Image: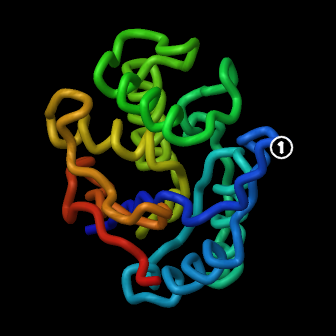
Amino acid sequence: MATIYFLTHPEVIIDPATPITEWGLSDVGRRRMERFVGCEAAQGVVAVYSSNERKATDGAAIAAAALDVPQRVDPDLGENDRSSTGYLAPPEFWEVVEAFFARPDENVRGWESARAAQARIVGSVGRLARNEPEQGDLLVVSHGGVGRLLTAHLQGVEIGREDRPAHPGGGCWLEIDRDILTIRRSWQAIPD
């Protein structure tokens, strides 16, 4: 039984002067990513996928190099499009995130709607599960928001009612059965 490990990227360098899609992993995020690839779960991974956002490609590069497997990029694995607002400082950011999940059919503040982002991430994970030529486990390095949307779909619950990653810095993974796309094990965090 092959598994898809859907991993939210760990801690990033937050720089309001840099586009969010260009933020890279912090030293803490890199160390946590290295811990993940050293754990037993990662040892059967045959390919690593990520969005095209730097924080995800940074994490995917660490994993692919450590596991000596191919790294592939799929833009559809990206976080919900927030380019209409760019960087929002807390607490405003968290207020908009709450509205994003509470009103999934709306483009809150011009952001991609949760429903559209959910369709995109579900479609992408389904495609890579079917089309990856290597048999075995896959690692997807993506983002927390779309990870929650994927979880809602896989759990068959309304957006906003899904299990959530518990670590505030990201770096949490979900285990999904690659063949039937069901959750095998809910969110776990890479140790600090």
| Residue that protrudes farthest toward the front in the picture | 91
Residue 6 versus residue 102: which sits nearer the camera? 102
Provide residue 176's location: percent of width, then percent of height.
29, 57
Disc 1 crowd, CA 10 A, few/some/many (<14, 14-19, 20+): few
- Secondary structure type for disc 1: loop
Q: Residue at x 47, y 28 (%)?
A: 120
Q: How many marks?
A: 1
In this rendering, the answer to whether 13 lies above or below 78 is below
**Residue 6, image x, y percentages:** 42, 58
Residue 5 or residue 68, whichever sits in front: 5
192 over 179 or under it: above or below: below
Residue 163 x, y percent position in the rendering: 21, 50
**Residue that mark 1 sits on:** 18
Residue plotted at (44% across, 39% down):
146
In the displayed orientation, state which residue is furthest to the right.
17
**Residue 30 vertical placement versus 4 (above, below):** below
What colour scheme was applied to this rendering of the protein?
Answer: rainbow
Q: Residue at x 45, y 79 (%)?
A: 42
Q: Amino acid at mark 1?
A: Thr
Residue 67 location (% of width, % of height): 61, 82
171 or 184: nearer the eye?
Answer: 171
Quarter of the view holding residue 31: bottom right
Q: Is residue 70 left or right of residue 18?
A: left
Q: Residue at x 54, y 14 (%)?
A: 109
Q: Nearer the viewer, residue 52 or 18?
A: 18
Q: Specify the quadrant that holds the N terminus.
A: bottom left
Looking at the image, residue 93 sits to the left or right of residue 188; the answer is right
